[in-house]
Amino acid sequence: MPRSARPARSSHALSSTRAPLRRLPAAGVSSSRHRATLFGRCAAALAVGSLLLAGCGQGGDPAPEEEISQTGASDEGGADSSAGDGSDGASDSGGEPSDGGGATAAAVPVDPYPVTPAPDDFEAPGACTGEGAHLAEVGSGGAEPGLPERAGESLTIEVTAIEGDHAQLTAAIGSADPRPIEDITVGESVTIDLWTISLTSVCGDLDQVEFDLIN
């Protein structure tokens, strides 16, 4: 039997059953848009980075004009400080004379009492005679017995050293500092203010000196 002929569908029915077709963008257009987007993003990132670098540079290093002004200010401050130092130095230098005037003057060497040589006809029996009214020993203080006071003052004779037949003596009037006497030996004399003494014995082995008051 012949197949029955299928009824023909109308063109309206066919168009209603088919899904609508979408147009796909061309490949070239899509890639160009993607590149444009990436380029825009990179440009924005570079702009932000340059702004950040500019901000850091401005905050870290001062402008040349600012450096010049700061340098001038520091120089002026140094000048002021140096001026202040100069004023201090002037005051210090001005104070030197007062310090020099208030300082204790160096001790002036005192001339020793001069010794009168023995008479020409004097013959010493020897240096250590063991004779004399007053005895003094090296390092033992004043001679004993002490010399009499005159005009309300006392005289103290001490022996500081003995070298051979010569003795080194000092004389102190009252509370004054001791004054040296020239090296003296037996037969010689020395005048100390109101006192005149004559040396009669020098014993180096015993560290003893003896003398007489002759005036």
Image: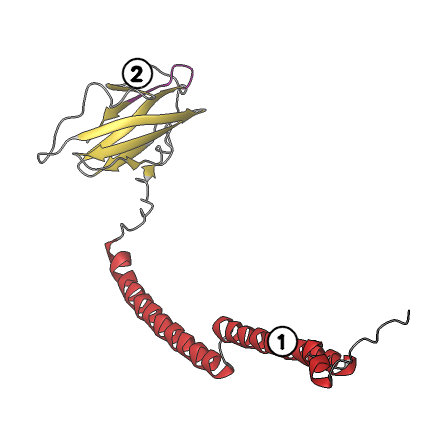
Q: Where is 169 relative to 109, above or below? A: above
**Residue 28 location in percent, x, y?**
78, 82
Q: Can residue 23 be seen in this view?
A: no
Q: Which amino acid does label 2 sit on?
A: Glu
**Residue 178 location in percent, x, y?**
26, 35
Helix, strand, or loop for circle 1? helix
Q: Which residue is drawn at 40% across and 20% down?
A: 127
Q: In which quarter of the image is the N terminus?
A: bottom right
- In the rendered image, residue 115 lying in the magenta stretch gets the answer no
Closer to us: 85 or 193: 85
- Identify the mark at residue 24; answer none if there is no mark: none
Q: Where is 206 relative to 53, above or below? A: above
Q: What residue sits right under mark 2 in the picture? A: 131
Q: What residue type is labelled 1?
A: Arg
Q: Which residue is drawn at 26% across and 22% down?
A: 141
The answer for how far apart the CA atoms under marks 2 and 1 are is: 128 Å
Closer to us: 100 or 72: 72
